[in-house]
Amino acid sequence: MKENKVVFLTQAALIAAVYVVLCVAFAPISYGEVQVRVAEALVILPFFTPAAIPGLFVGCFLSNLIGGSVLLDVLCGSLATLLGAVGSYYLRKSKILVLLPPIVSNTLIVPWVLRYGYGVPLPIPLMMLTVGIGEVIAVAGLGSVLLQVLMRYRHVVFRKEYV
């Protein structure tokens, strides 16, 4: 039982670290009004392990702090990722449905953060469209490729009690 907790915490920490590294490495497209956050491809990881839920939340939280985001973005942006990760975990039986919660949560929440946190004057529906397109590219595009690759190595990368 203690080994499971160590594995869980280790996986969560590694996922958070990779999320932060991807945001920092791709900083020009990870932050701003129009973004394709490459790290969002990791939101498919709840398909493989529940440790991805806190890992993604902490990774997003730290990335937003490091990236110089306003407090509203640090909190609400991270909560959007958390909601998406939880939704993905509950829909993990389907390789297609697992992609939807992060896209939906970020598309609905982030435009409001852009408006009230950064004062972006664009119409909310337009920002929902731009955020949604970025999420579709990152999650449905990159995330689905990552999902397929990890399916081959899931028993090596993730402990079998989680798969």
Image (cartoon, rainbow, N blue to C red):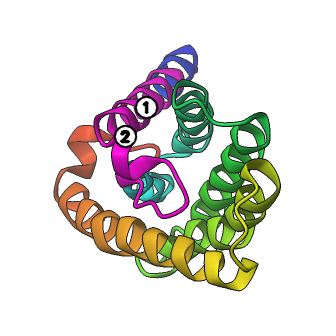
User: On the image, numbered disc 2 is attached to which residue?
Assistant: 27
Front label number (2 vs 1)? 2
Label 1 sits on what residue type?
Val
The residue labelled by disc 1 is: 20
The amino acid pointed to by label 2 is Ala
Q: Secondary structure at mark 1?
A: helix
Residue 70 locus on image (x, y percent): 71, 36
Highlighted magenta segment, given as a residue range: 9-38
Where residue 4 sits in the image (x, y, percent)? Answer: 52, 25
Side of 5 where 47 appears, left or right: left
Q: Nearer the viewer, residue 2 or 143?
A: 143
For the N terminus, give its image quadrant: top right
Up the image or down, 49 lies above or below 63; here it is below
Q: Nearer the viewer, residue 3 or 89?
A: 89
User: Badge 1: few (under 14), some or many (20 or more) residues near its Cα, within 10 Å?
Assistant: many
Question: How far separated are the C-alphas under marks 2 and 1?
Answer: 10 Å
Does label 2 or label 1 sit earlier along the sequence? 1
Question: Which residue corresponds to the image point at 59% horizontal and 72% vertical from the top-left?
Answer: 91
At a point 70% along the width and 61% down the height, the residue shown is 120
Residue 7 in the image, given as x and y percentages of width and height:
45, 24
- Magenta-drawn stretch contains 35: yes
User: How many numbered circles are shown?
Assistant: 2
Q: Which mark is residue 118?
A: none
Q: Is residue 120 left or right of residue 103?
A: right
| Residue occupying image coordinates x 53% and y 25% | 66
Quadrant position of residue 18: top left
> Which SS class for mark 2?
helix
- Observer able to see residue 93: no
Place of residue 75 in the rendered image (x, y in percent of width and height, measured from the top left): 76, 40
Examine the structure image and report whether residue 11 is included in the region drawn in magenta.
Answer: yes
